[in-house]
Amino acid sequence: MVYKTSFPFIAKLLNKQVEDPIIAIDVGCRWGFADKFLSLEEGIQLYGFDPDQDECAALEKRYNAQNIHLIPLGLSNEVGQKKLYITKEPACSSLYKPSSYLTDRMPALQCAKEEKQADIDVTTLDIWAKDNDITRIDYLKLDTQGSEYDILQGGNRLLSTVRFLEIEVEFNPIYEGQPLFSDIDLFLRSKGLELWGFKNFVHYGEGEDSEILLAPRYVHYDENQYETPARGGQLFWADAIYVHKDIVRAQSSIIGKGQRRRDLILADALGMHDIANRLHDRSKGIT
């Protein structure tokens, strides 16, 4: 398999012998999670978590690779059993109870209507990692419908090793009592992770709100301004991208050579070519 990259120097890195593989963990891996990393082959170890055993079995059969591991287990901030609220669309199931106020009033949120409950086993990221001799995480993705903050707390020891993190965050709660973006952002910054950007912004409305045109909104990239159309509805969630502060500031002098290689390869695989270019410019000689 040939790895497609925007930068020739990334290809050179991939051709070198892998000393320590990239460790990537996806919590809430329903529908698939490994595809963007498949070209890295033996240079990465992938771990996907989902409490649905059937989903894990299907993904294990789909990928059928020695470096891709499916774990049918829930993660939280403690070890034990927790109640899982299973929803109309299984991907919306959560350890937090869906807001019936929202699911009754907002057509797009009917997928999160509660249908039944089940007790599931949960552990923490730190305990699982210790049991499996994992001492660092290069890439972490969390999409667990409101329980992301609990998982972060359960991974308190490992979080300082995370280089890239993608996480679903809520600005307004969809589930009762769930922590919001402000809680998550402060916690991640205390672990050396800085907000890099958002991949999307998801709005919901009642009835035909989304058909109502609003004044356009703007996105700025330095001096470049882009106009985007806007429609009615309240902002609820987004996928946020965090990057370790050493990468943001490209402080290559305090990053080991092996880590710099993994950072560059990951940035490219994630489509973060601006970071890959910045790291390369300030890390000459690692190839």
Image (cartoon, rainbow, N blue to C red):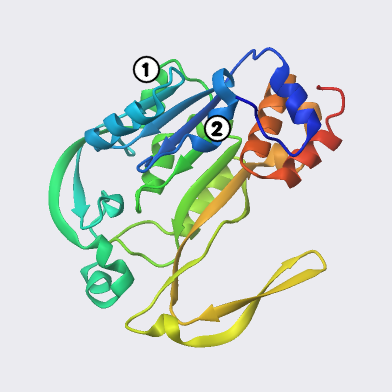
The residue under label 2 is 37
Point out residue 242 in the picture as x, y percentages from the top left corner.
59, 47
The residue under label 1 is 131
Callout 2 amino acid: Phe
Q: Which mark is residue 25?
A: none
Dot 2 falls on a residue whose secondary structure is helix
Instruction: Pick the residue in front: 240 or 58.
Output: 58
**Quadrant where the C terminus lies?**
top right
Callout 1 amino acid: Asp
Q: Quadrant of residue 191?
A: top right
Q: Distance between the Cα atoms at labels 2 and 1? A: 25 Å
**Quadrant where the N terminus lies?**
top right
Instruction: Pick the residue in front: 138 or 3.
Output: 3
Dot 1 falls on a residue whose secondary structure is helix
Point out residue 230 in the picture as x, y percentages from the top left corner.
55, 79
Above or below, 122 relative to 88: above
Task: Name the residue at 25% across, 55% down.
Answer: 89
Task: Name the residue at 32% across, 83% down.
Answer: 207
> Does residue 210 appear anywhere in the picture?
yes
Above or below, 32 relative to 15: below
Q: Are marks 2 and 1 in contact (CB under 8 Å)?
A: no
Task: Name the residue at 51% across, 20% down.
Answer: 135
Spot the residue most to the front.
Answer: 1
On the rendered structure, is 97 left or right of 37? Answer: left
